[in-house]
Image: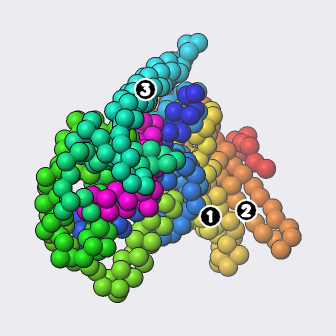
């Protein structure tokens, strides 16, 4: 159950980013027909219910890059195995990490296991309460409507309600209160029939079911309210377009006369004629102008692109080819000290910071950077830095010392990394490939320096001292792992 909750939280965070983007889009394109704003909420619903998606360079969530599974079909802000990690973090996807309680050495239970179990129980309780409340309210509404008198077709009349509603899932019916005037009735019937034709009587309860699952997220509550508003406004526009713009005044008057407050919590029950932001709806009706076919066509293209962009996962940031500076056998190593200090990080999972550190290190002449791999799932946590032989380089690759020295610097500046691996690939021909790897563990680095290398990361002067020490070392003769 905990793994399910983590999946829901990850979906909810992504859905929040999409919802905020939809809210901004609604403001920027407020003159567009409201049906398009209504359809945009589909992207939020997809993010709330489907954990996987395709990756695309067109993704409008390119600024969201959670490092757990960045560039994959999953947006993972909380690791699925967060209960088992020694130093778990919440990565909100915008280069911000939030530390979670760490495991205690010698303890039989990871604190995160207890915390996640409690949070999961609270989530289940809240969802159950909301679901039960919705069922009770729905049954109460049905009890009021079951005595209604048939007028015609699927239209019923009753004295138990004060505003017209659509009620029912498989066979939706229109219920109107007694006393509706002949002038108001055509607008009411057309409005409710429009809801039925568009399947709004199914969409609204489904949206509320998603809200129950994501009840802990306030952005989803706001999204649900705005979605209902767009649903009603787009329905109003459809009625005006169907009955003629000359009826706007009469339609607005009907809406105002039958407006009703439905309480603070709007459950996924019937669709009421005047249930959502009547003042804003009346303003929208009065200002409505039937859009030209050109405007509609452009709006369709724009909103289709937006939905695609909101539902696609971003491709990962391209890693730079590591350092631009090179080191040879006869020159000092060149470290970008300012860049090293700017990218110092506690967590190996922070890919942007780790990539920044790597780009501030010198590389041997004759190599070209290919990328990096981060091991954050299980200990030992590690960084693998991959190079390939530059066949066009004037000076062939020969120096291994630089790998060990750079490893010491990285181990000092990435607090929870345990192992640095350098991998060099060489393609001999199309079918033959050779590779070599150089590894250094934290224990080995501490032994070489005679103390915990992380002590050198306290300030710029200490890092400079560390660099001076590693530059003076010669460690080619040490017994390291090379394959």
Residue 131: give its label.
Answer: none
Q: Main secondary structure of the magenta part?
A: helix
Q: Residue at x 81, y 62 (%)?
A: 434
Is residue 64 visible in the rendered image? The answer is no
Of residues 368 and 155, the one nearer the viewer is 155
Of residues 59 and 235, the one nearer the viewer is 235
In which quadrant of the rendered image does the N terminus lie? top right
Position in image of residue 265 (x %, y %): 28, 35
Q: Do the CB atoms of the residues marked 2 and 1 lie less than 8 Å apart?
A: yes
Is residue 204 within the magenta segment?
A: yes
Q: CA distance from mark 3 to mark 2?
A: 60 Å
Q: Residues within 10 Å of mark 2 (few under 14, many from 20)?
A: some
Relative vertical location of residue 347 with respect to residue 106 in this rendering, above or below:
below
Which segment is the magenta one?
A: 187-216
Per the image, the residue denoted by label 3 is: 132
**Quick one: SS at disc 3?**
helix
Per the image, the residue denoted by label 1 is: 370
């Amino acid at each position: 159950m905990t793994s399910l909750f983590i999946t829901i939280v990850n979906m909810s965070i992504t859905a929040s980013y999409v919802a905020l983007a939809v809210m901004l889009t609604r403001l920027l394109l407020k003159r567009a027909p409201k049906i398009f704003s209504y359809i945009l909420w589909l992207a939020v619903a997809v993010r709330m219910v489907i954990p996987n998606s395709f990756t695309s360079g067109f993704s409008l969530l390119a600024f969201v890059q959670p490092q757990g599974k960045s560039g994959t079909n999953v947006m993972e802000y909380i690791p699925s195995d967060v209960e088992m990690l020694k130093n778990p973090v919440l990565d909100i996807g915008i280069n911000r990490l939030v530390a979670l309680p760490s495991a205690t050495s010698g303890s039989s239970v990871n604190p995160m296991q207890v915390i996640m179990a409690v949070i999961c129980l609270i989530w289940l309780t809240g969802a159950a309460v909301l679901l039960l409340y919705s069922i009770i309210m729905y049954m109460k509404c049905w009890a009021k409507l079951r005595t209604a008198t048939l007028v015609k077709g699927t239209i019923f009349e009753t004295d138990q309600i004060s505003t017209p509603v659509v009620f029912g899932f498989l066979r939706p019916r229109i219920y109107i209160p007694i006393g509706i005037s002949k002038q108001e009735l055509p607008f009411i019937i057309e409005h409710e029939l429009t809801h039925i034709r568009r399947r709004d009587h199914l969409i609204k309860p489904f949206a509320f079911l998603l809200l129950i699952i994501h009840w802990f997220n306030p952005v989803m509550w706001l999204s649900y309210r705005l979605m209902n508003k767009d649903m009603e406004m787009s329905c109003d526009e459809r009625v005006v377009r169907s009955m003629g713009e000359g009826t706007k005044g009469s339609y607005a008057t009907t809406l105002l006369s039958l407006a009703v407050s439905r309480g603070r919590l709007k459950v996924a029950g019937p669709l009421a004629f005047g249930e959502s932001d009547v003042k804003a709806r009346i303003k929208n009706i009065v200002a409505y102008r039937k859009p030209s076919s050109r405007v509609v066509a452009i709006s369709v293209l724009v909103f289709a692109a937006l939905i695609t962009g909101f539902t696609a996962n971003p491709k990962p940031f391209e890693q730079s080819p590591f350092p631009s500076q090179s080191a040879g056998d006869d020159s000092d190593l060149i470290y970008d000290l300012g860049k090293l200090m700017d990218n110092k990080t506690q967590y190996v999972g922070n890919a942007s910071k780790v990539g920044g550190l790597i780009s501030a290190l010198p590389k041997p002449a004759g190599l070209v950077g290919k990328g990096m791999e981060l091991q954050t799932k299980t200990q030992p946590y590690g960084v693998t830095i991959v190079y390939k032989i530059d066949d066009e380089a004037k000076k062939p690759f020969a120096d291994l010392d630089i790998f060990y020295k750079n490893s010491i610097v990285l181990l000092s500046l990435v607090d929870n990394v345990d192992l640095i691996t350098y991998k060099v690939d060489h393609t001999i021909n199309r079918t033959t490939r050779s590779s070599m790897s150089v590894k250094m563990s934290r224990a080995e680095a501490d032994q070489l320096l005679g103390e915990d290398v992380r002590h050198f990361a306290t300030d710029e002067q200490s890092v400079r001292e560390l660099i001076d020490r590693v530059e003076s070392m010669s460690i080619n003769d040490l017994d390291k792992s090379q394959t």
